[in-house]
Image (tube, rainbow, N blue to C red):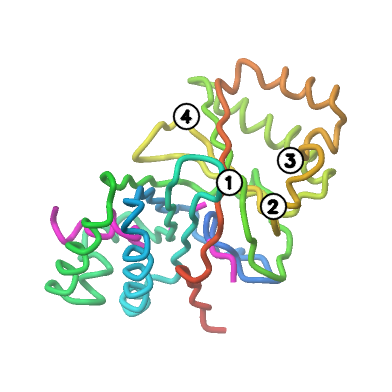
Amino acid sequence: MQVGSLSRHFLAAGAVWLGLAYGFAPRCFGQSSPGAPEMLEITIYKIKPDMVPEWEALVKSALPALKKAGVPVVSFWHTAMFGVDEWVAAVPIGKFAQFDGPSPFVRGLGEAGAVGLHAMAVKCFAEQPRSYAMRARMDLSIEGPMNEPPAIAVLTTAHVAYGKGPEFEAFLKNDVVPALKKAGITQYWVHQTVLGGDVNEWNSLTLYKNFADLDGPPPLVKALGQEGADRLAAKGAGIVLSLERKVLRYRADLSYHEMPPQ
């Protein structure tokens, strides 16, 4: 693997769905982020179970290099109880042109330091990491104020029928988002896959303070009642082919958000 592509396989290059940062990256607590970048790089890692302590220590040791390289946000999430054990890293993509130059690790550590870091990271991987470019769709999201970081998030992956993207967007905007707001959901972030995966795949994060918030009826049932939620699901039939949900835990100890100058 070339060192120039290191950032696409360890911590991502510059993002996800995170104060909290952008999309996957938590936004600044207590305020919105109107200048948040449109594009995110999301990298999925599967780590050998016996290498998790080494992996966490490696990530922590790499964060200063990313800050030195000018990466404004690094956000890490880790599967919490439900779903395949995965680590999700998210950093913003300013412009795709950034991938034409040296990786953040080369800029922050130099060529030799980046090669050494990559060699240590490879020892931790259970399989090759995978990176995605995703578009943050804040026009389809709910972004209320936050005064503290989230503990967990429910990640929902929707596979949309080919050619049904516009209908899915309208379904989210006109039906799902109003119901979620009625249920009291204040953080619901939608992302659309652009490169690296299924372009008919959409991901959303719904943030919660703790697992106890998951008790009781699901948000759509809470807002619409069971019959109303069933009608909404029927309306989505033919648009959404399948849904998958997992719970992620935000790892503040492996993340940072550099505040922009005021």
Q: Residues within 10 Å of mark 4 (few under 14, many from 20)?
A: some
For label 3, count other residues whose C-alpha is less than 10 Å away and answer few (under 14), some (14-19) or many (20+): some
Say which label, 1 or 4, has the lower sequence index: 4
Q: How many marks?
A: 4
**Which residue is denoted by mark 4 in the rendering?**
200
Which of the pair 181/127 is nearer the observer?
127
Of callouts 3 and 4, the N-terminal one: 3
Q: Indicate the amino acid at tag 4.
A: Asn
Ranked by sequence position, the earlier of labels 2 and 3 is 3
Q: CA distance from mark 3 to mark 4?
A: 20 Å
Image coordinates of residue 118 in percent, x first then y, are 20, 62
Label 1: few (<14), some or many (≥20) within 10 Å?
many
In the rendered image, which quarter is residue 182 located in? top right
Closer to viewer: mark 2 or mark 3: 2
Give the residue pinned by disc 1. Answer: 247
**Residue 11 on the magenta span:** yes
Q: Give how far across and how far down residue 71 sits, in percent.
A: 38, 70
Residue at numbered disc 3: 177
